[in-house]
Image (cartoon, rainbow, N blue to C red):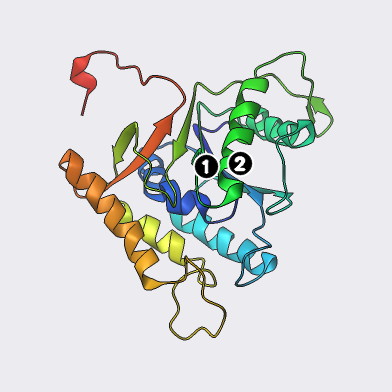
Amino acid sequence: MKLDILAFGAHPDDVELGCGATLAKEISLGKKIGIVDLTRGELGTRGSAELRDKEAKKAAEILGVSVRENLAFADGFFINDKEHQLSIIKMIRKYQPKIVLCNAIDDRHIDHGKGSKLVSDACFLSGLSKIVTKDNGETQEEWRPKNVYHYIQWKNIEPDFVVDVSGFIDYKTKSVLAYSSQFFDPESDEPETPITSKNFIDSVNYRARDLGRLIGVDYAEGFTTERYVALENLDKIF
């Protein structure tokens, strides 16, 4: 299956938190979207890997993505080496996306920056014909995405561009709350973490509202780029 956009996240819920509304909007426009989680989030303070699997499936259904896969890298301990790069290259060549979305280049959780660099490097290597990979016994065609963008996560990184997601913020919120073991639950007796407070959930909404305010719409999501964003002409600026 060829996809228009493939979104990578170091953990299940990274994609939903970072760009869930953007994905929902692109899907509404007829785009085919996929999500690849690098780990199962097994080191998360709350819940378990098995529960996160179920939550990720539910979140994917809410957003309406075409496919979701998990590479089962070691949470907290995966590295940017040949073995991990090849696993991602296989995903890129399998789905041949025009656009890849991935973790923030610098963030509070060490896996986010690592995952960002790992996916970015794999996107480049995936275009090299002398790197041979196979899927179901068949040699894959080399493929390099046209663009790699990084969504914003815990840190308030200055975006290089923002996407108007007015009308789609509810999809983001519902997909995030599908991870019920991870976020605010006043009845939970599990340990508190930086993402279990009501303030954190509220911050997901008010960040989108603030970015929207800055461009004159209700809600927006921000991204950073690895190269200049090119416009066909000045009329294409929103």
Q: Position of residue 54 (x, y in %)?
A: 61, 65
Q: In the rendered view, does 137 fall on the left or right side of 200?
A: right
- 226 up-or-down from 153: above or below: above
Q: Quadrant of the N terminus?
A: top right
Along the line of sight, the residue nearer the viewer: 76 or 4: 76
- 159 up-or-down from 175: above or below: above
Q: Say whether residue 154 is visible.
A: yes
How packed mark 1 is, by other alpha carbons closer than 10 Å (few <14, some 14-19, many 20 or more), is many
Along the line of sight, the residue nearer the viewer: 223 or 64: 223
The type of residue carrying mark 2 is Gly
**At 44% across and 49% down in the image, what residue appears?**
153
Q: Say whether residue 64 is visible.
A: no
- 90 up-or-down from 40: above or below: above
Q: Are marks 2 and 1 in contact (CB under 8 Å)?
A: yes
Q: Quarter of the image holding residue 181?
A: bottom right
Q: In the rendered view, does 118 fall on the left or right side of 184?
A: right
- Residue 103 is marked as 1
**At 27% across and 57% down in the image, what residue appears?**
206
- Direction left: furthest residue: 216
Which of marks 1 and 2 precedes in the sequence?
A: 1
- Residue 181 is marked as none
Q: Which residue is mark 2?
A: 115
The type of residue carrying mark 1 is Asn
Q: Position of residue 9 (x, y in %)?
A: 56, 46
